[in-house]
C-alpha cells in the first residue's frame, strides 16, 4: 500500500502543475548574436589574405632550396627537400579548402566563421615553418 502511494506521488510530480508551459528546455542557447555581414567580410578578407601568404610561403621554400647548392660534394637529402618543395603547396591548398569547408558549415548554421579564416592563415604559417625546417635539415651535408 505504501508503494502504491509513492508511485502516485511520483506521477503527481510529473504533472502539468510543475511545468505549466511545458517541459524545460535542456539545450544550451548561444548568447552571441548570429553572424552578420561584418563576419562575412572579415572571413572573406582572411581567406583572401591566406592565398597570397600561400604564394609567398612557397616562394620562401623555393628560395630555401638554394641551400642545396652548397651540397656539391653530396651528402644532402634531396628527397626530403623535394617533399617539402612539392608537399608545401599541396598541403596548404588542402588545408585552406578544409578551413573553407568549416567556414561554410558555420555560416550555414548562422555562426561566426572568421576564426576559420584565421585558422587557414595560421595553418599556412605552420606549414611554411615545417617546410623550411625540413629543407634546412635536409640541406646539411652529412
Image (cartoon, grey):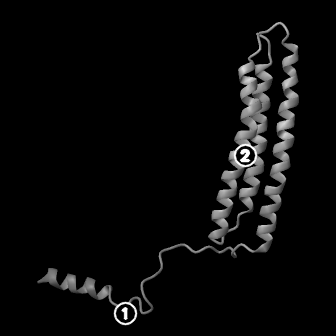
- Observer-side mark, 2 or 1, equals 2
Residue drawn at the location 80% of the way across and 19% of the way down? 139
Query: Which residue corresponds to the image point at 79% horizontal and 42% vertical from the top-left?
Result: 125
Please give the name of the residue rendered at 73% of the width and 52% of the height, measured from the top-left corner. 119
Q: Earlier in the sequence, mark 2 or mark 1?
A: 1
Tell me if 8 is positioned left or right of 97 in this view.
left
In this rendering, the count of numbered labels is 2
Location of residue 30 with respect to 135 vertically, above or below: below
Residue density around tag 1, few if under 14, some if 14–19, many if 20 or more, within 10 Å: few
For label 2, the crowd category at 10 Å Cα-Cα, with few meaning under 14, some 14 to 19 and many 20 or more, is some
Quadrant of the image containing the C terminus: top right
Q: Position of residue 126 (x, y in %)?
A: 75, 40
Viewer-proximal residue among 8 and 107? 107
**Residue 14: x, y in percent?**
32, 85
With 104 as the anchor, is 81 left or right in this view?
A: right
- In the image, is residue 122 above or below residue 3? above
Indicate left or right for 127 with 101 as reference. right
**Where is the N terminus found, in terms of image quarters?**
bottom left
Check disc 1 and report the residue beneath it. 17
Q: Quadrant of residue 2?
A: bottom left
Q: Outermost residue toward the top?
A: 73
Q: Residue at x 65, y 72 (%)?
A: 110
Q: Quadrant of residue 116?
A: bottom right
In the image, residue 70 above or below residue 24:
above
Q: Position of residue 24 (x, y in %)?
A: 45, 82
Q: Which residue is mark 2?
A: 93
Q: Secondary structure at mark 1?
A: loop
Q: CA distance from mark 2 to mark 1?
A: 59 Å
* Nearest the eye: 134 or 89: 89
| Tag 2 secondary structure | helix
Mark number, residue 40? none
Amino acid at each position: 500500500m505504501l508503494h502504491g502511494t509513492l508511485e502516485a506521488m511520483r506521477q503527481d510530480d510529473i504533472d502539468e502543475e510543475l511545468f505549466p508551459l511545458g517541459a524545460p528546455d535542456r539545450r544550451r542557447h548561444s548568447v552571441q548574436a548570429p553572424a552578420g555581414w561584418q563576419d562575412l567580410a572579415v572571413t572573406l578578407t582572411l581567406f583572401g589574405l591566406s592565398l597570397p601568404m600561400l604564394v609567398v610561403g612557397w616562394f620562401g621554400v623555393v628560395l630555401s632550396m638554394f641551400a642545396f647548392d652548397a651540397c656539391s660534394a653530396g651528402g644532402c637529402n634531396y628527397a626530403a627537400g623535394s617533399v617539402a618543395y612539392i608537399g608545401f603547396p599541396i598541403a596548404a591548398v588542402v588545408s585552406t579548402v578544409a578551413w573553407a569547408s568549416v567556414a561554410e558549415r558555420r555560416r550555414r548554421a548562422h555562426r561566426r566563421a572568421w576564426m576559420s579564416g584565421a585558422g587557414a592563415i595560421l595553418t599556412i604559417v605552420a606549414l611554411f615553418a615545417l617546410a623550411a625546417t625540413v629543407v634546412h635539415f635536409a640541406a646539411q651535408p652529412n
